[in-house]
Amino acid sequence: MIRTLTALSLAALTALPARPNEAVELVMVEQPGCIYCQRWDEEIAPAYPKTAEGAFAPLRRVDISAVEESVTPQRAVIFTPTFLLVEDDVELGRLEGYPGAEFFWPMLDTLLHDKTDFEDPTE
């Protein structure tokens, strides 16, 4: 009986589709003293993990001095914050700077739609 239940459980788990985006992340490159990073933290960070975007591309923070140890960027990161959309730690695209919430969300949505299979359930 236990063997049958174990076999059925394993079969059910292997039949479940893997999340297609499990390796997609939004990497926030920051540095101490960055006032725009602080603004992002105040205006966006509390809500981000609760959004469709945050569920699809969870946030990971990386110090600017350790970028190339953490991800493979398409080119050097010069500004903070820089948001790298990565899959398996390879950059797909980026947003440089933080011009405010009214620009961040539409720019992020465009990046996600252009570079991944992201579908916002609210659209």
Image: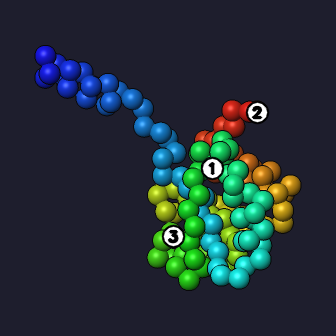
Q: Residue at x 69, y 55 (%)?
A: 46
Between label 3 and label 1, give the one nearer the viewer.
1
Considering only vertical position in the picture, is 116 above or below 8? Answer: below
- Please identify the quadrant where the C terminus is shown: top right
Of all residues shown, which one is farthest toward the top? Answer: 1
Closer to the chain start, of discs 3 and 1, is 1
Closer to the chain start, of discs 3 and 2, is 3
SS type, badge 1: helix
Q: Amino acid at mark 2?
A: Glu
Q: Residue at x 59, y 58 (%)?
A: 59
Q: Residues within 10 Å of mark 1 (few under 14, many from 20)?
A: some
Q: CA distance from mark 3 to mark 2?
A: 32 Å
Which sits in the foreground, 50 or 91?
A: 50
Q: Amino acid at mark 3?
A: Thr
SS type, badge 3: loop
Q: Which mark is residue 111?
A: none
Between label 3 and label 2, give the one nearer the viewer.
2
Give the quadrant of residue 97. bottom right
Q: Which mark is residue 49?
A: 1
- Residue highlighted by disc 2: 123
